[in-house]
Image (tube, rainbow, N blue to C red):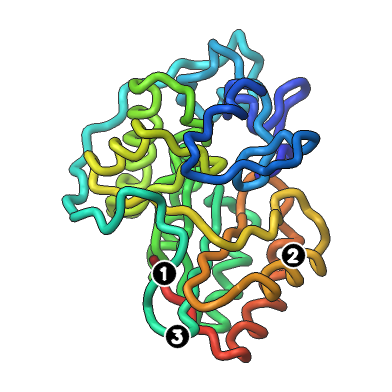
Amino acid sequence: MGVEKAAPGITRRVLLTIGGLTLFSVWAVEPVDQNPAAARWPDGHRAPAVRADALTAGDRSARHAPASQRHRARSAPDHPRLAVARRSELPLRTIDDGSKAIALTIDDGPDPVYTPQVLALLARYRVTATFSMIGIEVQAHPAVAREVAAAGHLIVNHTWTHLNLAWLPPAVVTEQMSRATGAIHDATGRIPGLFRAPYGAWSPFVLSQCARTGMEPLGWSVDPRDWSRPGVAAIVTNIMRNTRTGSIILEHDGGGNRSQTVAALKIVIPRLLAAGYHFRTP
């Protein structure tokens, strides 16, 4: 989740969190990085401050236009919810599908540049993955979202504009979740049954909202921090070193330049397959 796609003076994630105070609000569901210099959220992504007038921004222009031109979010479309029983009350961090079963999750898309590259790679190796999609990106690139769905991959609700939900009012949290579901349904015909909180910032209300809407909370267990572009070798080494039976791997196809992620996946997918792992969805 990078900051590359931003207008002057506004980071890509200017809408995402409520500054440094939120570092103390992760509710103990996801462990916080203990390095105070890093000042990161649990998934390793920096959490820049958010303007109060941008918390409910709903149009794609909200992340790129001057503050004076931002639009407040409209009410979410009323779409049916998927009625499913929860398998757990806490975020799912591993999968249980037999020996050597693992899951590949890819966040922050769909992106018109990198998502097709990832899809081509997955098709080459006949791998099924899980895509956590941001609603505003789905709205902007519905054809890419449909391509993901048509290829048989699982689609997860990753909020409307990728805000940090931990300290937001319930009404905003509800809107962030429901608008994303609406966008995904409009583009693909699917109602997501899984929800991933941006930054892994869970709260009791977010978890209760997952239960109310029939979406299971999805976490991860392997995070190579590809969003920070640490280098292809670093991403590959992290994944190969930390992946084991049941692992849920976190990667990104949106949020910035993801060329390192694509290059790393070209290496790790065949290596993991050669090691006997098989890819499943949560």
Kindly indicate the quadrant of the structure image that contains residue 84.
bottom left
Q: Residue at x 39, y 28 (%)?
A: 173
| C-alpha distance separating marks 1 and 3 | 10 Å
Please give the residue where the numbered disc 1 appears in the rendered image. 95
On the question of residue 203 being in view, the answer is: yes
Q: Are marks 1 and 2 in contact (CB under 8 Å)?
A: no
Kindly identify the amino acid type of the residue bearing the numbered disc 1: Ile
| C-alpha distance separating marks 3 and 2 | 24 Å
Q: Secondary structure at mark 1?
A: loop
Give the quarter of the figure containing the C terminus.
Answer: bottom left
Could you say which disc has been placed on residue 179 in the image? none
Q: Secondary structure at mark 2?
A: helix
Residue 182 falls left or right of residue 241: left
Q: Residue at x 74, y 60 (%)?
A: 259
Q: Nearer the viewer, residue 137 or 196?
A: 196
Please give the residue where the numbered disc 2 appears in the rendered image. 235
Q: Residue at x 69, y 66 (%)?
A: 262
Disc with the residue nearer the chain's start (1 vs 2):
1
| C-alpha distance separating marks 1 and 2 | 21 Å
Q: Residue at x 71, y 56 (%)?
A: 226
Kindly identify the amino acid type of the residue bearing the numbered disc 2: Ile
On the question of residue 144 being in view, the answer is: no
Q: Position of residue 206 (x, y in %)?
A: 37, 35
Kindly identify the amino acid type of the residue bearing the numbered disc 3: Ser
Circle 2 packing at 10 Å, graded few (<14), some (14-19), many (20+), is: many
Q: Position of residue 191 (x, y in %)?
A: 28, 51
Q: Position of residue 251 (x, y in %)?
A: 61, 59
Q: Are marks 3 and 2 in contact (CB under 8 Å)?
A: no
Disc with the residue nearer the chain's start (3 vs 2):
3
Q: Is residue 181 above or below residue 241?
A: above
Please give the residue where the numbered disc 3 appears in the rendered image. 99
Circle 3 packing at 10 Å, graded few (<14), some (14-19), many (20+), is: few
